[in-house]
Amino acid sequence: MSEQVGAAFILTVIFGFIFAIVYLGIRRKERMALLEKGVDASFFISKKTSSTTLKFGMLFVGVAIGILLGNILEYATPLDEEVAYFSMIFLFGGSGLIINYFIEKKNEEK
């Protein structure tokens, strides 16, 4: 079990690094092209209205609830340990992010 989790984690990190390098390379080329066309550098400064603290807080609360309910599912149902934990973590973590989206959308309208 732990070998599979370790291998999956290593593969995720490797693909994450590859994605980040490609993404940042493309982003840099796009920015350089815009600067060559005469776009002001202040264009790249984003005006974030979202609260990252709220977003991460809701994500972590969702993950915590998912871990608790995964533990309950593991002992109360015939589900495997991995299925119970991962399904609940993703379900409640994603739910927290969706709720955060609607909260931010409501705040933007005001």
Image (cartoon, helix red, strand yellow):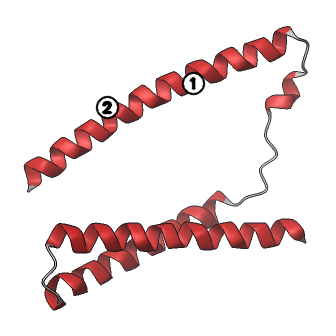
Q: Label 1's element? A: helix
> What amino acid is at disc 1?
Leu
The N terminus sits in image quarter: bottom left
Q: Position of residue 71 (x, y in %)?
A: 22, 81
Residue visible at 14% across and 87% down?
75
**Can see residue 80?**
yes
Task: Residue 27: name its quadrant.
Answer: top right
In the rendered structure, which disc, 1 or 2, sits on the residue that comes first in sequence? 2
User: Disc 1 and disc 2: Cα gap in Å?
Assistant: 16 Å
On the image, the x and y values in percent for residue 41 come to 85, 22
Q: In this rendering, is residue 3 above or below 67?
A: above
Q: Please, which residue is most extreme toward the front here?
A: 78
Amino acid at circle 2: Ile
Q: Name the residue located 16 percent from the left edge and 78 percent from the top edge.
A: 79
Query: In screen coordinates, is 18 left or right of 85?
Result: right
Look at the image and tell me in which quarter the C terminus lies: bottom right
Q: Position of residue 26 (x, y in %)?
A: 61, 20
Position of residue 44 relative to residue 82, above or below, is above
User: Mark 2: which secondary structure?
Assistant: helix
Residue on which disc 2 sits: 14
Query: Label 1 belongs to which residue?
Result: 24
- Where is residue 67? Give x, y as percent: 31, 75
